[in-house]
């Protein structure tokens, strides 16, 4: 999408990637912090466990990650049905498959779990999916969703009623990449033939897939017009057909790294755009279920570059957070909110506001708003978190979640009924391996406590690494 020489400076991204590659022996704190459980390792101690994801519902707590052992990477799953006090022994979902399994995504609903990932073997990469009909007690043998004729990677998965949806990018012989979609109308018993949502000679980036009722939404970045723009395509018939893609960015600059949120008939999208000369966070809204979009607005409009936005919606509120460059070596985490369904946004506020680089935030809301990010003010990367109980008007002072001698990253965060659930990866001693840790908070108190952190290495680094292993040149936006 964007020439890195002209985009927001990514010194911190380089540092973070080095943190992944170098051994930084951790020491896990043993003292249980007030209001929070001790950090618990839920992965194998023998393998290298990375890139965790987390889902929380009334049915339980569900986690997936990749684990590499003896040169083979697999997709692992574990669940807790007692609120996170204990987790089942991890299950290897890709044990029956060959090749390297990576980039897992999953959804859960009505006691059904669907997990999809890419599996690379002998120079090709396919999209696989497995399901559980008993909330993760057992899983069926994986099936292949992609047709195997081209390299396929970076899957997404969504669920609506009995319908299961998946999307991915497919690389053609001419090196173009297109958005592919497949669906099941019978709870994953069978899938129809993959459908090409795009047919172009350019590059379509990793799609974001969402479903609500009979509506299915695909959002991606695409350079088919010569520069990168953000496109959205909607299906109104449960994925049987898709509307002609809409260019919702419509700016003169480069647009990319989009994210989407759905709230009733409102569809919200954010991305980074350099029309002004710097990168800003742009927002566009549809009030008619994605049929049309209003003109994009700049919701950051700050000095310096703004990038990597995250978005969530709660009732009439829209919350956006991003990484903001302050100086050549310093970054902060900013937040902006709308209380009128995205019609207008308040002035952004600085959530981190400290001398060390802070960036790549995550955001969730269950009425309260929680934002976490990576910070290196102490000389190593810690994870900080803050909370707002008044809809984002004010935030508590950031709390350091890490308090360990090592560095943690790749967190996933969920909130349900005022409880915050977290998983992350952290290195084990000097072995170079990582373990997946879990903790939950039942009371958000000023001192979050000294358990091993929930931090994040820039996801794009992991994506690039995966794309190289898959021999697929991904349209990441930082070429």
Image: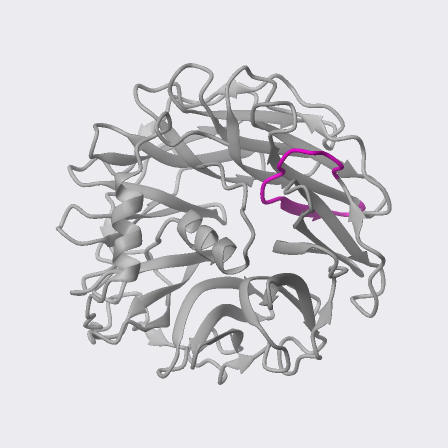
At which x and y percent is residue 289? 73, 33
Taking depth in this image into account, of 348 and 369 the one nearest to the observer is 348
* 66 up-or-down from 395: above or below: below
Up-down relation of residue 431 to residue 404 (above or below)? below
**Left or right, 450 with reference to 373:** left
Residue at image position (47%, 35%) is 319
* Percent x, y of residue 288: 74, 28
- In-image side of 129 versus 48 (left or right): right
Q: Residue 366 in the image: state x and y as whole percent.
A: 50, 49
Between residues 369 and 283, which one lies in front from this camera angle?
A: 283
Magenta span includes 206 = yes
Q: Residue at x 60, y 68 (%)?
A: 122
- Residue 23 visible at all: yes
The structure's colour scheme is one colour
- Which percent across, then down, holds residue 201? 69, 34
Q: Main secondary structure of the magenta part?
A: loop
Q: Quick one: 121 or 90, which is closer to the camera?
A: 121
Where are the magenta residues, as a range?
A: 198-214
Please say whether residue 106 is visible from this viewpoint.
Answer: no
Q: Quadrant of residue 99?
A: bottom right
Query: Is 255 placed left or right of 389 in the picture?
Result: right
Given the current orientation, which residue lies at the most extreme left position? Answer: 379
Rendered image quadrant of residue 137: bottom right
Q: Is residue 454 left or right of residue 460?
A: left
Vertical side of 441 occupied by 346: above or below? above
The quadrant where residue 45 appears? bottom left
């Amino acid at each position: 999408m964007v020439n890195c020489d002209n985009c927001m400076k990514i010194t911190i991204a380089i540092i973070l990637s080095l943190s992944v590659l170098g051994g930084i022996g951790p020491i896990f704190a043993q003292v249980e912090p007030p209001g929070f459980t001790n950090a618990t390792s839920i992965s194998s101690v023998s393998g290298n466990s990375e890139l965790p994801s987390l889902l929380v519902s009334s049915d339980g707590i569900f986690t997936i990650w990749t684990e590499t052992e003896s040169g083979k990477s697999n997709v692992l799953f574990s669940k807790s049905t007692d609120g996170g006090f204990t987790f089942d022994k991890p299950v290897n979902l890709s044990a029956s498959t060959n090749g390297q399994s990576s980039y897992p995504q999953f959804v859960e609903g009505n006691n059904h779990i669907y997990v999809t990932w890419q599996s690379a073997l002998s120079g090709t990469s396919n999209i696989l999916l497995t399901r559980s009909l008993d909330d993760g007690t057992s899983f069926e043998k994986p099936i292949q969703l992609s047709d195997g004729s081209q390299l396929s990677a970076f899957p997404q998965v969504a669920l609506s009623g009995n319908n299961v949806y998946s999307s991915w990018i497919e690389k053609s012989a001419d090196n173009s990449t297109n958005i592919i979609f497949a669906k099941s109308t019978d709870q994953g018993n069978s899938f129809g033939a993959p459908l090409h949502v795009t047919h172009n000679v350019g590059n379509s980036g990793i799609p974001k897939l969402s479903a609500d009722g009979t509506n299915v939404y695909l959002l991606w970045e695409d350079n088919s017009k010569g520069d990168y723009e953000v496109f959205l395509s909607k299906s109104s018939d449960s994925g049987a057909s898709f509307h002609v893609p809409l260019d919702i960015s419509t700016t003169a600059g480069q647009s990319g790294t989009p994210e989407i949120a759905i709230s009733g008939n409102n569809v919200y999208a954010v991305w980074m755009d350099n029309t002004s000369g710097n990168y800003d966070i742009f927002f566009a809204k549809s009030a008619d279920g994605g049929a049309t979009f209003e003109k994009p607005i700049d919701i950051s409009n700050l000095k310096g570059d703004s990038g990597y936005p995250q978005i969530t919606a709660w009732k009439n509120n829209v919350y956006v957070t991003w990484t903001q460059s302050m100086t050549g070596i310093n970054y902060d985490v900013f937040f902006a909110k709308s209380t009128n369904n995205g019609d207008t946004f308040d002035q952004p506020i600085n959530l981190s506001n400290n001398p060390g680089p802070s960036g790549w935030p995550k955001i969730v809301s269950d009425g309260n708003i929680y934002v976490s990010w990576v910070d290196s003010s102490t000389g190593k990367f810690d994870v900080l978190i803050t909370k707002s109980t008044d809809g984002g008007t004010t935030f508590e002072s950031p709390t350091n979640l890490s308090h360990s001698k090592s560095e943690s990253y790749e967190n996933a965060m969920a909130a349900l009924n005022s409880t915050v659930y977290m998983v992350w990866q952290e290195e084990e001693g000097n072995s170079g391996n990582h373990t997946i840790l879990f903790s939950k908070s039942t009371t958000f108190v000023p001192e979050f406590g000294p358990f091993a952190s929930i931090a994040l290495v820039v996801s794009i680094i992991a994506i690039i690494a995966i794309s190289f292993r898959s021999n697929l040149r991904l349209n990441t936006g930082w070429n």
